[in-house]
Each structure stands twice: as C-alpha cells, then as structure tokens.
Image (spheres, rainbow, N blue to C red):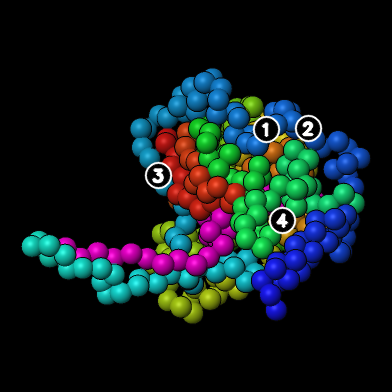
Amino acid sequence: MKLSIISGVVLALFAGSAMAQTLKGPVSDKPLQENWAPSKWGADDKAGSANHTKNSANIKKALATIKQFKAITIGKYYHREAPAFGPRGWHMWIPGTPTGGPFGQNALVYHDELVTTEIGQIQTQFDGPGHIGVNTSKGPQFYNGRISWDSYERGAGGRVVGMGPLGVEHVGELGFVCRLVVLDAVAYRKSQGKISASAEMLPIPKSTDSPGIITAADMQGMMKAQGLSDLQAGDCVALHTGQGNTWGNGRYKSLNSEQRAAARAIFAQGEPGFGISACEWMASKNIALQMGDTSANDAQPFGEQGDVYAVPCHTEMMPRRGIWNLENVDTESMVKAGIKEGAFIWAPLRIIGGTGSPGNPVVLY
C-alpha cells in the first residue's frame, strides 16, 4: 500500500472521530445546563485555582502559620510495588551498570534511570485540567468548557501528544503557596465513638451511612474540634483517613513484598474520603487545593449519593470549578508531627500537555 493511501486512511479515521458528538456510555449534560464555563477566572484561563497564588495576601497568610520553623515533605515513595489505581504502574530500570563511562583521566562513570509510567497519575499525583472531564452530548468537556478533542495537540498521523490548553504546565507556571489545614478524620471518628480506639484508618464505605464518608458537617466538626479558624479563599485542605498509613513513608521501605501486596489489596477495595457535601462546602469557601492520603480522595465505592456516581467530587471540583486535587500525600507524617496548620508550597512539573504531575510537596510549620 502506498504511503499516500495509508495517510489518507489515517486522516479519514481521525476526521471521523473528531466529528463524533459523544463517547459511548453514560452522558451528562449538567455542565451545559448549569453553564460551567466560563470559569470565575475568565474564559481564557487555563490554571484554575492556582490563580490564588497570585494574591500576595494568600502567601502572607500561609507564611504566618509557621510557628516552629520546621519543614516536612509529604510526597510518597515512587516504587513498582506501591499501590496504584487499576492497571497503572511504576516501572524503573537502570540501563547499563553503569549507564555510561568511564570517561577522562578522572574515570567518570554515571547512572541514568529509564521510567515508564502514567507520570501524572501515579503515587503522589496532581490532577491537572486535562485529567477529569464529563462526557456531554457535545463531547467530553473539561475545565472552562474545553472539549478534549478540540484541545488536543496532535503529532504524526493524528496521534494525541498533549492536552493543549488543558496541559498541566499552565498550573505549574503558578504553583501553590497556601495556608494548609490538616483535618484528622481518624481522631474525629474516634471521638464520636464511630470507630474503635485502636483503629488506624476509616472504613472503606459500603453504605451511605458509613463513617468512612466525610460530610460537610464532619468538616466543620473537625475544624472546631481542632481549634482551627474558618476556611478562607486560597486555603488548601488535607484530609487524613489513615488508609495511606498502609504504605506510609515511615514504614514502606521496611515492608516486604507480601506486605506491600496487602497494601495494594486494601486500596483496590475502595477508600474512605470526601463526600460530595464536603467538596461543595470547600468550594463555597473558595479553596485552592484539596488533598488526602488515598488514590482519589473521594469516598468510594459508596458516597453520600450511593454508588451510582463515579468519584463525584472529581467532576464537581475540577471541570466545574477548576479546584484541583492532590492524591496520595503522606498525611500520617503531618498528624504524627502534630501539624494542624502550616504553609503548603508546591508546584506541578511543567509537563507540556500533561494530564497531571508527580511531586514531593513541602509543608512549613
């Protein structure tokens, strides 16, 4: 077959997919009916809640929380045996032993690593503008009303090579400096008598009344119990459910392969986390970022609305409001250090067209 014919077939297939109005499966026109776009940051905005970092008052507020002048990093370990959602995985090799050298009279040698992974969606992971959307009758709609196939950067043969205006680099150009509030849901549920005094984590929710679902009322209750002032615009919120303890930074290196497999099995069952009312409450406070110690931060398989919605906080916060999500952070280390409030400092990598980013955030307290 001639190259020109092959090219014509590829372009025809691409044109057919671009003309499609929706993907097969469930369709929701809620983003269209409720006018999720343009966003509060303007029709051309690509960074969403990272825009809070432009406000010097938010940076001043964050730095004012530093009392002990200490620092802690809260990124989790990246490793082939760490828990991951579905088929995602971290695969790293050291090519060559060493990779290069020796060179010169000083006999220099070096090592490189080769990594294959869903780089924006593995272990500690930031969900960027191109990660979560809603399948509407006009196509998959993402932050600020952008339809994915109208946004893609394409390479040879029409292959998608980036998310265009939905790329994570637009958030990375601003980053986050914010007052961080750390909410200990495990201690709170113990104080309510809803989990045992020896429990290390909230239960994976299997019903709508599970103590593994954190509601708006729970959020306010934890704020009050911990003596924290109300959430303000530009704040960041971390939820400690305890599920991340199973592969926490304080123990992961000492776990054997069987113990790591057990941690993965727990994550595969679901996770405690935010109910939809908690996310809507945080959105009403105009926060900059939500985070937690699980793979999604949404309570699942059951949330406040049952098990018929797929991680609803994801759609209500990100494509609707441009409020971003950071997953699998080491909340355990902050709780053990007694951190209830601090200055959160972090930025996703400037991966042009990426859906998200790995990272190792710093908290000053």
Q: What amino acid type is highlighted by mark number 2?
A: Pro
* Front position among marks 2 and 3: 2
Choose between 330 and 207: the one closer to the eye. Answer: 330
Residue identifier under label 3: 72
Q: Residue 49 in the image: state x and y as whole percent.
A: 64, 34
Helix, strand or loop under label 1: loop
Residue identifier under label 4: 299
Q: What amino acid type is highlighted by mark number 4?
A: Ala
* Front position among marks 1 and 3: 1
Residue identifier under label 1: 45
Q: Is residue 315 magenta?
A: no
Q: Which mark is residue 34?
A: none
What span is in magenta? 108-134
For marks 1 and 4 on the same chain, the one whose residue lies earlier in the sequence: 1
For marks 1 and 2 on the same chain, the one whose residue lies earlier in the sequence: 2
Helix, strand or loop under label 4: loop
What is the crowding at mark 3: few (fewer than 14 residues within 10 Å), some, or many (at least 20)? some
